Image (cartoon, rainbow, N blue to C red):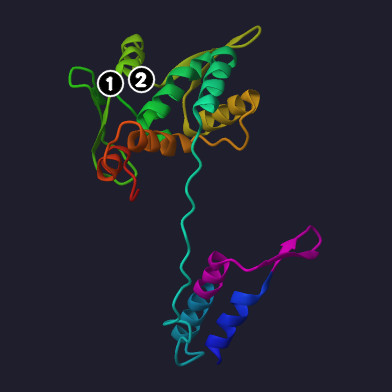
């Protein structure tokens, strides 16, 4: 029943590193606030179910404050890393170069670029209208000179990023852009370029950072363009 004492125990408990077979080894650190928060949330859920099933009269964790956790700054790509990935893509997967540039120059999510239709690409107005977004809110992304050139060159295709022909050593295969494919190709190109732990979703943070620090767009403006819940 000593909930406060238990929370203090968790906050000072040594963290363990697990190994196969169930073996553990102290890490030399205490449990992080995120881990303690997870413990409390899980216990809160368990006691809530127990109370619903009449195993206990109250939930002792319902009013326990959750430890504050700092949201880590997302990793972004340096200019040299971007150049290396794009050079490698041009050499080893040229069919992906355009869509990678679109991700880097718009901050779109992987599925947003793949779902684009030509009616969404308004070259005359200089914007891309994103109608099928994660937040289900229409947003508009500006089209710069490089994006304009990409879309003009692809204008004869049924959609901006649909099917494409991948040339192998002896045969040509028709493939379709999808979220899984572009994510794997981004990681593969990054590995070949010597950029470790690369993830396609980090292009969004890279674009947002460029808007803030290079283009001097306000945080609210960046949030509107990129579609982040917060900045």
Callout 1: few (<14), some (14-19), or many (20+) C-alpha neighbours within 10 Å?
some
> Which residue is at the front of the view, 85 or 154?
85
Magenta segment: 15-41
Verify CB contact (< 8 Å) between mark 2 and mark 1: yes
Q: Where is the N terminus found, in terms of image quarters?
A: bottom right
The residue at 49%/20% (across/down) is: 96
Q: Disc 2 and disc 1: Cα gap in Å?
A: 7 Å
Q: Is residue 46 above or below residue 216?
A: below
Q: Quadrant of residue 146?
A: top left
The residue at 48%/82% (across/down) is: 61
Q: Is residue 175 above or below residue 6?
A: above
Q: As drawn, which residue projects farthest toward the top? A: 170
In the image, is 29 to the left or to the right of 137?
Answer: right
Q: Which mark identifies residue 55?
A: none
Q: Is residue 94 magenta?
A: no
User: Tag 1's secondary structure?
Assistant: helix
Please tell me how many numbered marks the rendered image carries: 2
Q: Position of residue 134 (x, y in %)?
A: 34, 44
Callout 2: few (<14), some (14-19), or many (20+) C-alpha neighbours within 10 Å?
many
User: Tag 2's secondary structure?
Assistant: loop
The residue beneath circle 2 is 160
Q: Position of residue 171 (x, y in %)?
A: 62, 8
Q: Position of residue 72 (x, y in %)?
A: 49, 52
In the image, is 109 to the left or to the right of 130?
Answer: right
Q: Is residue 31 magenta?
A: yes
Q: Which of the two labelled residues, at mark 2 and mark 1, occupies the earlier sequence position?
A: 1
Q: As drawn, which residue projects farthest toward the left? A: 125
Q: Which mark identifies residue 118?
A: 1
């Amino acid at each position: 029943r000593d909930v406060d004492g238990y929370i203090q125990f968790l906050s000072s408990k040594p963290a363990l590193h697990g190994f196969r077979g169930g073996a553990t080894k102290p890490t030399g650190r205490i449990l992080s606030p995120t881990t303690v928060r997870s413990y409390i949330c899980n216990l809160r859920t368990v006691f809530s179910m127990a109370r619903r099933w009449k195993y206990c009269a109250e939930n002792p964790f319902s009013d326990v404050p959750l430890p504050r956790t700092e949201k880590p700054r997302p990793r972004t790509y340096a200019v040299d890393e971007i150049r290396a990935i794009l050079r490698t893509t041009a050499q080893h997967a040229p069919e992906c170069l355009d869509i990678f540039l679109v991700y880097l120059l718009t901050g779109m999510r992987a599925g947003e670029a793949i779902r684009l239709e030509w009616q969404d690409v308004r070259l005359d107005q200089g914007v891309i209208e994103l109608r099928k977004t994660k937040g289900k809110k229409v947003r508009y992304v500006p089209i710069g000179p490089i994006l304009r050139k990409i879309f003009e060159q692809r204008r004869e295709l049924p959609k901006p990023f649909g099917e494409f022909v991948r040339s192998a050593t002896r045969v040509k295969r028709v493939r379709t852009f999808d979220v899984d494919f572009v994510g794997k190709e981004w990681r593969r190109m990054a590995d070949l370029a010597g950029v470790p732990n690369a993830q396609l979703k980090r292009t969004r943070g890279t674009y947002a950072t460029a808007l803030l620090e290079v283009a001097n767009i306000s945080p609210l403006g960046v949030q509107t363009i990129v579609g982040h819940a917060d900045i």
